Image (cartoon, rainbow, N blue to C red):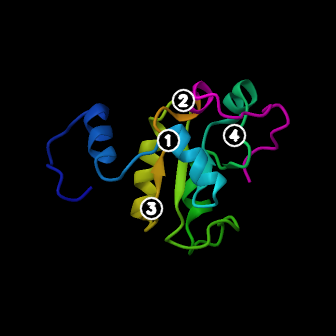
Amino acid sequence: MSGWSEQPFGIDELLERVRAAYPRVTAREAHEAARSGEALLVDIRYAALRERDGLIPGALVVERNELEWRLDPLGSHRVPEATGHDLRVVVVCNEGYASSLAAESLHRLGLHRATDLIGGFQAWRAAGLRVVDGASDSGPH
């Protein structure tokens, strides 16, 4: 966030600034990128939302409070999918707000291709893309 004024600003302006720093993707773009192996979808929603609304098939579940530790390619707690800083990650939250802040945090870790899903899981579902039952979710990986 270098270059930002020292004047306080609210969350709406923060989101605007963060989102201007990288290209975000639509549900269809995220689906195609994941299907073709170009991107890793990472669902950061908490368990109650996954259980209520379901899961995106093939998405890696990593709750928001563990995201940086699990996706840092240099970290000792990384998931096997965290193969390097060039990994294209599409972060998915419920409606596309928390995921924007999460993607910005991944950029700070050097994951320069990190982005997020515009409208989050709700946009995925609204686009008619496949969702599976979240009741069998075993939690974060």
Residue type marked 3: Arg
Residue type marked 1: Leu
User: Which quadrant holds residue 15?
Assistant: top left
Residue 87 image point, x, y percent: 54, 66
Does residue 125 appear in this view? yes
Circle 3 sits on which residue? 113
Residue type marked 2: Ala
Q: Which mark is residue 75?
A: none
Q: State if disc 4 and disc 2 touch (CB < 8 Å).
A: no
**Residue at 44% across / 65% down in the picture?**
109
Q: State left or right for residue 1 relative to residue 66.
A: left
Q: Residues within 10 Å of mark 2 (few under 14, many from 20)?
A: some
Q: Which mark is residue 123?
A: 2
Circle 4 sits on which residue? 56
Dominant secondary structure, magenta: loop
Could you tell me how far apart the alpha carbons at marks 2 and 1 are, in whole angstroms? 8 Å
Q: State if disc 3 and disc 1 touch (CB < 8 Å).
A: no
Sequence order check, earlier mark of 2 and 3: 3
**Residue at 70% across / 29% down in the picture?**
48
The magenta stretch spans residue 132: yes
Residue 40 image point, x, y percent: 61, 56
| Secondary structure state at the residue bearing disc 4 | loop
Circle 1 sits on which residue? 117
**Residue at 75% across / 29% down in the picture?**
51
Q: Is residue 106 above or below residue 30?
A: below
Q: State if disc 1 and disc 2 touch (CB < 8 Å).
A: yes
Could you tell me how far apart the alpha carbons at marks 3 and 4 are, in whole angstroms? 21 Å
Residue 7 image point, x, y percent: 14, 42
Q: Which residues are magenta?
A: 122-141
Residue 104 image point, x, y percent: 40, 52
Quadrant for the N terminus in the image: bottom left
